[in-house]
């Protein structure tokens, strides 16, 4: 069996589909770019098909789209309030981009874009830049009240402000690492159990019972990974709503 088939890290290797260099800048189209584009296309195609007919009695596809729409709208409203609905398109796009990227990654031999820190880090930085940009645009320097909650004694601020600043700086890091680590670890475990089962079967008939156990664990883990794929999209979106709420209401 080829070593790449047994290597649990091989599935995360970025490879060039179309090499393109302009000067010293490498603009090659990679498998990561391709699967991200695929996720965007699937999301657009899903909602386009769901809303194209405009039936009086919704089809199953339309009902699923409406449930997704209402789910994200309720999430934004419950965390950031009615004023937060101005960010609904942003949160909606983030949620379904991550959701479709995660689900595509569950297909055998597909590439999981959210298992790369550069992708999740870019999404996290986008969220923080939106929070900072809107907070400063709307509140000006009053936005920095976020780091100094009102009503505390002066001496407490000497401790509280550095903690709040560090907490804010850590937000994009934790937001990116949470999604990246969960998708990376889950896919590594899936590959390990699958490879272990195949290796045991190849080793001889005596190892078949253990191979069946390993395969069963892989199936159970696969079901769990589908749950994690959806849950991580939700966690990323709801934390985005929490951070956007800080931009809308910086003073505690």
Image (tube, helix red, strand yellow):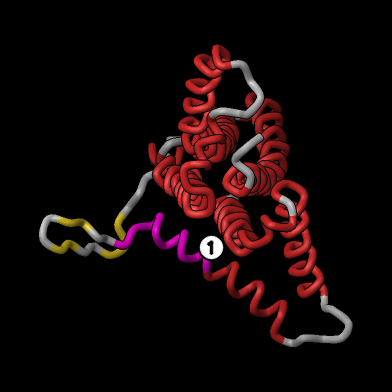
Residue 248 located left or right of residue 159: right
Q: Residue furthest left?
A: 23
Report the front residue among 207 and 176. 176
Task: Give 71 or 40, whichever is nearer the viewer.
Answer: 71
Left or right: 201 in relation to 22: right
* Residue at 64% from the left image edge and 48% from the top image edge: 241
How many numbered marks does the figure carry?
Answer: 1
Residue 201: percent from the left, percent from the top?
59, 33
Judge whether residue 110 can be spotted in this image. Answer: no
Q: Quadrant of the C terminus?
A: top right
Q: Which residues are magenta?
A: 29-40
Task: Residue 249 in the image: state x and y as whole percent.
Answer: 63, 44
61 inside magenta stretch: no
- The rendered magenta stretch, by its main secondary structure, is classed as helix
**Residue located 55% across and 40% down the image:** 179
Question: What is the quadrant of the N terminus in the image?
Answer: top left
| 161 to 238, vertically: above or below | above
Give the percent coordinates (x, y) of residue 98.
Answer: 57, 53
| SS class, disc 1 | helix
Residue pointed to by mark 1 = 39
Determine whether 6 is above or below 78 in the image: above
């Amino acid at each position: 069996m080829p070593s790449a088939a047994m290597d649990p890290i091989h599935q995360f290797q970025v490879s060039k589909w179309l090499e393109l260099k302009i000067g010293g800048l490498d603009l090659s189209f990679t498998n990561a770019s391709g699967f991200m584009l695929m996720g965007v296309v699937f999301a657009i195609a899903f909602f386009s098909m769901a809303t194209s007919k405009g039936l009086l009695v919704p089809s199953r596809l339309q009902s699923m789209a409406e449930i997704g729409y209402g789910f994200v709208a309720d999430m934004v409203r419950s965390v950031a309030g009615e004023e937060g609905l101005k960010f609904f398109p942003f949160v909606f796009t983030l949620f379904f981009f991550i959701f479709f990227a995660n689900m595509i990654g569950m297909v055998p031999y597909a590439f999981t874009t959210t298992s790369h820190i550069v992708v999740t880090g870019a999404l996290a930085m986008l969220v923080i830049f939106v929070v900072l940009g809107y907070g400063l645009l709307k509140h000006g320097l009053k936005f920095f009240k976020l780091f100094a909650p009102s009503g505390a004694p002066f001496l407490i601020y000497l401790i509280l402000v550095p903690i709040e600043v560090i907490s804010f700086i850590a937000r994009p890091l934790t937001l990116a690492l949470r999604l990246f680590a969960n998708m990376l670890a889950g896919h590594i475990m899936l590959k390990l159990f699958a490879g272990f089962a195949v290796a045991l079967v190849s080793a001889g008939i005596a190892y078949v019972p253990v191979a069946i156990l390993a395969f069963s664990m892989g199936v159970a883990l696969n079901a769990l990974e589908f749950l994690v794929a959806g849950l991580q999209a939700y966690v990323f979106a709801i934390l985005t709503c929490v951070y956007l709420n800080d931009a809308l209401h910086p003073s505690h």
